[in-house]
Image (cartoon, rainbow, N blue to C red):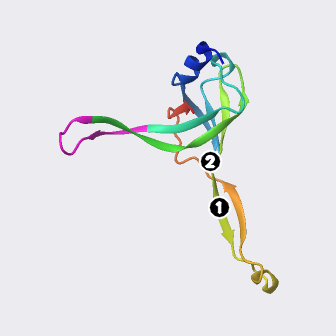
Amino acid sequence: MSTKQTEADDVVFEGRIAQIIDDHRIVINKGREHGVRVGQRFLILAIGDEIFDPETNESLGQVEVVKGRGEVTHVQEKMSTLQTTETHEIRRKPSTLFALTQGAEVTHEPKAFIDPEIGDIARRL
C-alpha cells in the first residue's frame, strides 16, 4: 500500500443522514463521487452537549452520541444506502413439551439504529 493510500485512509470521512428509510436503513449524502464503496462501514452519531471537567471546569468538548453502525449496501453518484450491522441475541422459550428438553431457541436479529435524525453524522470507520 502506498503512503498516499495510507494517508487517505487516515482522513476522517464524514457524511450526513439525508433520509431515513426504516429502522434498519438510512441514506447518506455521500456517494460514488466521494469515494464511497459497497461494504464500507460507518458509525452513525449525533453531537451532544458540551462536557466540562468537574475539577478544572475546562471544556472537554462535545460528547458524541453513538446511534449505531452501518454498512454501505448500495452506492449512487451522490448518495449511499447503509444498513445496520449490529445484531442482538433473541432467546425464545420453546412452546412444546418436546422442545422443552431441547433448550431455548437462539436467533440473531438486526438491531435498529437508535433514533436517527436527518443531519446526524455518518463517519467512516
Residue type highlighted by circle 2:
Asp
- How packed is label 2: few (under 14 Cα within 10 Å), some, or many (20 or more)? some
Q: Nearer the viewer, mark 2 or mark 1?
A: 1
Q: Quadrant of residue 6?
A: top right
Residue 23: mark:
2
The reply to whether the magenta stretch includes residue 12 is: no
Kindly identify the residue that appears in the image at 55 percent across and 32 percent down. 122
In this rendering, would 90 be left or right of 51?
A: right
The reply to whether the magenta stretch includes residue 56 is: yes
Q: Residue furthest left?
A: 56
Kindly identify the residue that appears in the image at 79 percent across and 80 percent down. 99
**Where is residue 68 drawn, in percent x and y?**
55, 44
**Where is residue 74 drawn, in percent x and y?**
73, 31
Q: Name the residue carrying label 1.
A: 89
Kindly identify the residue that appears in the image at 24 percent across and 41 percent down. 53
Viewport quadrant of the C terminus: top right
For the record, the magenta segment spans 47-59
Placement of 29 over or under 102, stated as above or below: above
Placement of 98 over or under 19, stated as above or below: below
Placement of 78 over or under 70, stated as above or below: above
| Label 2 secondary element | loop
- State which tag comes first along the sequence, 2 or 1: 2
In this rendering, would 11 be left or right of 63?
A: right
Q: Residue furthest right?
A: 98
| Number of marks present in the image shown | 2
Residue type highlighted by circle 1:
Glu
| Label 1 secondary element | strand
Viewport quadrant of the N terminus: top right
Q: CA distance from mark 2 to mark 1?
A: 17 Å
Q: Quadrant of residue 70?
A: top right
Q: Nearer the viewer, residue 65 or 118?
A: 65
